[in-house]
Image (cartoon, rainbow, N blue to C red):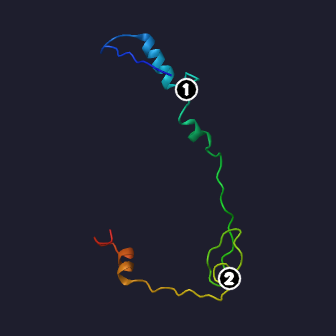
Amino acid sequence: MNVMFQQMPVGSDNDSMDDESEATMTGGNPSEIDPFHFVYSNIPDNTHILKLAANCEHCKARKFESETDGFCCRNGQIELKQPEPVPELMRLWSSMDADSR
């Protein structure tokens, strides 16, 4: 499809050109495909929030709704060492001095 655009002189008053450009901008021409239709046509009406699941009774890890028992720590067979907090990081986290701000 070849389309020729006629360049109008600055300050010209051409109503037919304004009607065509307005129809194109508002989607008035049904033969043109709206590039945003695909994006905005798939917006969901609601969201899915996972149900709360009980924490692991051995390691207290938070679990997903369908996660099996023992997935995180094999029912207490594996014990993760809790690292000691690094003093410098704790100071940056809890302090209100210029460095931590």
| Quadrant housing residue 5 | top left
Residue 29: image x %, image y %?
Answer: 55, 21
| Residue denoted by label 2 | 57
Say which label, 1 or 2, has the lower sequence index. Answer: 1
Q: Is residue 73 above or below residue 48?
A: below
Tell which of 70 and 47 is nearer to you: 70
Residue located farthest toward the left when viewing the structure as drawn: 98
What element does badge 1 sit on?
loop
Residue 4: image x %, image y %?
Answer: 42, 18
Q: Residue at x 56, y 86 (%)?
A: 80
Q: Is residue 72 above or below residue 20?
A: below
Q: Are marks 1 and 2 in contact (CB under 8 Å)?
A: no
Label 1 crowd bin: few (<14), some (14–19), many (20+), radius 10 Å: few
| Quadrant housing residue 37 | top right
Find residue 32 and name its label: 1
Residue type, mark 2 in image: Glu
Tell which of 78 and 35 is nearer to you: 35
Left or right placement of residue 54 versus residue 101 in this view: right
Q: Residue at x 65, y 45 (%)?
A: 45
What element does badge 2 sit on?
loop
Q: Nearer the viewer, mark 1 or mark 2?
A: 1
Residue type, mark 1 in image: Glu
Q: Quadrant of the C terminus?
A: bottom left
Label 2 crowd bin: few (<14), some (14–19), many (20+), radius 10 Å: few
